[in-house]
Image (cartoon, coloured by chain):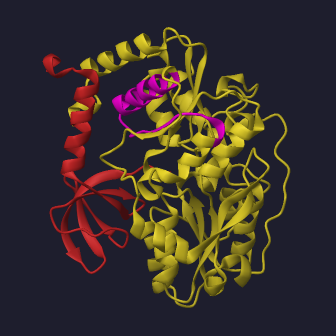
Chain colours: A yellow, B red
Amino acid sequence: MDLYKDRNASDAIIRKIFEVSKDLGEVKLCHVCGTHEHVITHYGIRALLPKNVQVVSGPGCPVCVTTQGEIEAAVKVAEKGAIVTTYGDMIRVPSKRSLSDAKASGLDIRLVYSINDSINLAISNPNKKIVHFAIGFETTCPTTAVAVLNSPDNFYVLSAHRVIPPAMDLLLSSGKINLSGFIDPGHVSTIIGTKPYEPISKKFHVPQVICGFEPNDILMGIYLLVKQIKEKRAEVENEYVRGVRTEGNTKAQKLMEKVFEPCDIRWRGFPVIPGSGLSLRNEFSNKDAYKEFNIEIEDIPEEKGCSCPEVLRAEKIPRECPLFGNICTPQSPKGPCMVSREGACYISFKYEKS
Amino acid sequence: MCLAVPGKVIEIKDSVGIVDFNGVKREVRLDLVDVKVGDYVIVHTGFAIEKMDEKDALESLHIWQELLKVQEDY
């Protein structure tokens, strides 16, 4: 599969991008995936594009869009004696009380690689309650659904799951940024397929291309987008054929549908986005940590001075934040985008600081 | 977070498989896919989320080559 990284192929695609976009005005493309941001910045793709073609980062990092209220809920669950598990960077995200501070104060908060590790923890600790603080987009939601259906009675889920298309709709509805097209997330699309994006293209007349994760996947996606713009089309195309079927993973969709129902939820940097959250259906209330521990999500205001909200809404790039690189660094992050390895600020600091 | 890596299923026991990621072998849950030993899967947080189809991969390469007409460059 060298073609996906091959420099000659990159050059050929870049030539095509220049050819197609030379008669276009300003083109602003937005992706909504932390892994895409990593590939784009790591390979310096922005520097290879024509001056009138810009790629910006949207709300594509689940760790970054999880609210302080949800983090606080996880801390409260731990205070009530449960062992709380969660993924990677979530633990370091600054908050009213971060999970790492809570852990340092003696609460039992553990990192896991997979929700399956949390189930095993529940099996080996039958006298403890194990709560998985479940973050992530559609890629991750089906794994939580499997866990809800196949776990012992002492295992619970604190769902902070979110789905992407309503956030994309909101970005365009806000009218604050003038987007010409979307680079759609590859592995979210592996689960949901191409259809859920179609209403967005119809409603706002914007083209979309689902992209894979090699540098040439991204370049090919950009080429297909500028080509659609030039031809005045607004369709959903799939560049990542090797990982995404048109219908998506229907087995995973059915499991998600069985276990979760849509709910209205606030995203860090956004207002409440209708239908963008996933909560456990009533029939699984015995697995729902919000119900088991009688906890509600508090509304905690965002930290002042930090531009993460604007970065997540694609209104600013990381270096436009006054805290970037001096007050806020990966060693001492002030906002979630500088913590997560998929956060735009962390990635920019790592690869573009100089 | 949505990072996922491809690997080859080398063993299956109920809903758990052993997947070989270029020599590193790990247990992976197979609840979300229908696969057999020898299939390639995309793995995210310990779960296979899709089977990678050789036919699809070849088709995608073909589409690329058509689009770019770069065959002569190889």
Give the extent of the magenta segment. Answer: A203-229
Q: Is residue A265 magenta?
A: no
- Viewer-closest of A57 and A125: A57
Residue A70 rendering spot, x and y as whole percentages: 73, 62
Looking at the image, which residue is at 66% across and 26% down? A317
Residue at 37% of width from left, 38% of height from top? A239
- Res. A80 in view: yes
Q: Residue at x 46, y 50 (%)?
A: A194
Quarter of the image containing the C terminus of chain A?
A: top right
Q: Position of residue B5 (x, y in %)?
A: 33, 50
Viewer-closest of A215 and A177: A177
Quadrant, the N terminus of chain A: top left
Whether residue B33 is situated above or below residue A273 in the rendered picture: below
Q: Quadrant of residue A58?
A: top right
Numbered marks: total: 0
Q: Quadrant of residue A206?
A: top right
Work out whether B38 lies above or below A301: below
User: Is A139 positioned to the left or the right of A265 in the image?
Assistant: left
Judged left or right of residue A301, residue B41 is left
Please give the name of the residue rendered at 21% of the width and 74% of the height, measured from the top-left corner: B12
The part of the image, by quadrant, that contains residue A174 is top right
Q: For residue A221: magenta?
A: yes
Q: Note whether A274 is above or below A331 in the view shown.
A: below
Image x and y of residue B25, in percent: 24, 61
Q: Main secondary structure of the magenta part?
A: helix
* Left or right of A287, for residue A15: left
Residue A59 can be seen in this image = no
> As drawn, is A283 to the left or to the right of A118?
right
Residue B7 in percent (x, y) is at 25, 55
